[in-house]
Amino acid sequence: MEDIVTVILAAGKGTRMKSEMVKVLHPLLGLPMLSYSIDLSLNGIKAKKTIVVVGYQADRIQEMFKGVPIEFVIQKEQLGTGHAVLQTIPSLQEFDGSVLILCGDVPLVTVETLRSFIDMYRENESTLSVLTAVVENPFGYGRVLRTPAGWLEKIVEEKDATDEERLIREINTGIYCVKAPFLKEGLRDIGKENAQGEYYLTDLVGIAREKDLRCSAHKVTDPMEVMGINTRVDLAMANERLRQQELSKLMLSGVTVIDPLNTYVEKIVQVGRDTIIYPFCVLQGKTKIGERCIIEPHSKVSDSIIGNEVTIHANSVITESTIDERTSIGPFAHLRPLNKVKAKAKVGKFMEVERFSSGRGTRVRGRGKKIEPRRKRSRGKKDL
């Protein structure tokens, strides 16, 4: 979308995570939490530009995303969401389209939801629109107040809300779409006369209303999508949702997952059709698994390339290795980094192999022992 620039807020420390690491770098299904918002902007809505506001551990975040086509803006002091977006004004100087504001700690929102939100914002010809959700327990969230006609009237933060306003269950998700000219002008009018002593981005609603500009609110269908990650409990809930989504995608693409409740496959792992994954398997990192493979229980594969028709027997571990087609590994085999196992080879049970390159059809029995294939062996099958 050439008329959309995305601003992602990622400057906070995340105190409730009880961690030395900045919150947005905590892993979710093998990727940093922040990467989900960045991916939405770059590959989902295809924004003209993606700006990430960083503060705490800014260098660490920038290093993690080195080479990604995004622009970083530093918020030296964490003085609120309004102050964070204010730091992006120089980057928006020549832009007069719309600005989509996302949160780096809200990783579950889908591209379909964002597209629907942007479409609604445009159809209503809004100056500002906010994505909202109705939740059972709104404690801690800003409450959304609407006019009798349903337009957005005001957003009140928890600490500034009256007892009556705290009864409202429609909350602000922190996701906005705003016309850039108004955003650049309105941010300069935000004050910090509130319980937190911060510059609230939500105050833009009041500023727009005072100018008789249209503000709208779009209610998300599934509140879980806009759940913010504040604690390790939230992190686990988000990880589980993403895990289920990825396993569903695999199964719909032709992969058999015997027990989805007890299988862990990370976000960027690729698995070919007709492969069977048994319970308690872990597939991590940049792993690519071919077609018609069998991965038996309690096996772990990390950052490895597995060819077609490979059998990984139970309780085997493969790390940073390449396994060619029609190979048999294990059971109880451990392939440490930088192994290359050629086609039709066999690494036997209880083997531990490191920096080893086999020949085609090689059999490995006993610790570190290499046995060349029998010349008259048919079809490459090997004994256990």
Image (tube, helix red, strand yellow):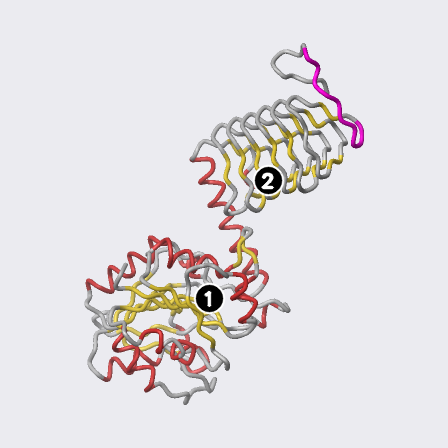
Residue in view at x 30 percent, y 56 percent:
115
Compared to residue 285, the image places residue 350 above or below, namely above
At label 2, the amino acid type is Ser
At label 1, the amino acid type is Asn
Q: Looking at the image, which is closer to me, 187 or 90? A: 90
Residue in view at x 72 percent, y 21 percent:
372
Label 1: how many residues lie within 10 Å, few (<14), some (14-19) or many (20+)? few
Dividing the picture into quadrants, the one containing residue 284 is: top right
- Mark 1 vs mark 2, CA separation in Å: 43 Å
Q: Mark 2 or mark 1, which is nearer the start of the sequence?
A: 1
Residue 333, given in percent of the width and then of the height, sits at: 72, 33
Q: Where does the magenta region start and end? A: 366-375
Residue 12, given in percent of the width and then of the height, sits at: 51, 73
Residue 224, given in percent of the width and then of the height, sits at: 44, 57
**Drawn side of residue 87 relative to residue 151, left or right:** right
Residue 275 located within the stretch drawn in magenta: no
Residue closest to the far bottom:
193
Secondary structure, mark 2, is loop
Residue wearing tag 2 = 304
* Numbered tag placed on residue 137 in the rendering: 1
Residue 371 located within the stretch drawn in magenta: yes
**Drawn side of residue 354 relative to residue 85, left or right:** right
Residue in view at x 54 percent, y 46 percent:
266
